[in-house]
Amino acid sequence: GENVEQHPSTLSVQEGDSAVIKCTYSDSASNYFPWYKQELGKRPQLIIDIRSNVGEKKDQRIAVTLNKTAKHFSLHITETQPEDSAVYFCAARPGGGFKTIFGAGTRLFVKA
Amino acid sequence: EPEVTQTPSHQVTQMGQEVILRCVPISNHLYFYWYRQILGQKVEFLVSFYNNEISEKSEIFDDQFSVERPDGSNFTLKIRSTKLEDSAMYFCASSELRRETEAFFGQGTRLTVV
């Protein structure tokens, strides 16, 4: 069935360093890949998304890359700040549908 | 900025009771969803709803669950005969009628079954 794998489950970085989170998806027809940030007890909030016709997208300190051949996409956060600490979820929207399949999440700790 | 609103924010119910979780999607959105997140776990898709009918549902969404759009603004999730394992955060979401577009999430209803 449709699945999204996400690694690592926990990531600890020093303030100012970069953080990279990697995901793979199973449905090759997936066409939309959002990334959500979830702070404790709050709703998932979209931080960046990428569509299947694009290989890379950047928004200030956040960038996402997509490799459709490998069915792999990654989130890159540069110059991390303590307020970046949260759980990050990658997700994919399988082709032919509107539901979103989430990865298991990465708990990011940014140490000041 | 328009947002999805959910009520109540927290619901405590006795095992075996029925609960109704309520959502008001963003007004010009046409696709509605319910997701569930058990504490510390990932967000799981339950059901999507379009044009007054279920368009897709997951294995989790069995006969215990039902959804309804009783009027032009509300979207509800009913859980019959709740079980302890139904305790979770339930998120409503909505999106425009385009596949490559964001789903906006509500703030969630924390359901606790005791």
Image (spheres, coloured by chain):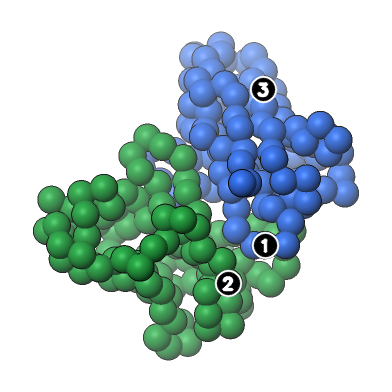
CA–CA distance between discs 1 and 3? 28 Å
Task: Report in which chain the residue with disc 3 lies.
Answer: A
- Label 1 residue SS: loop
Picture quadrant where residue A28 is located: top right
- Label 2 residue SS: strand
Amino acid type, residue under disc 1 in the picture: Gly
- The residue under label 2 is B55
Task: Report in which chain the residue with disc 1 lies.
Answer: A
Of tags 2 and 3, the one toward the viewer is 2
Where residue A59 appears, as percent x and y from the top left, is: 75, 39
Amino acid type, residue under disc 3 in the picture: Val
- The residue under label 3 is A20
Camera-nearest residue between B11 and A28: A28
Chain the render paints blue: A
Callout 1–callout 2 Cβ contact below 8 Å: yes
Where residue B112 appears, as percent x and y from the top left, is: 21, 51
- The residue under label 1 is A97
A19 shown above or below B44: above
The residue located at (31%, 49%) in the rendering is B88
The residue located at (20%, 65%) in the rendering is B81
Chain the render paints green: B
- Label 3 residue SS: strand
Amino acid type, residue under disc 2 in the picture: Ser
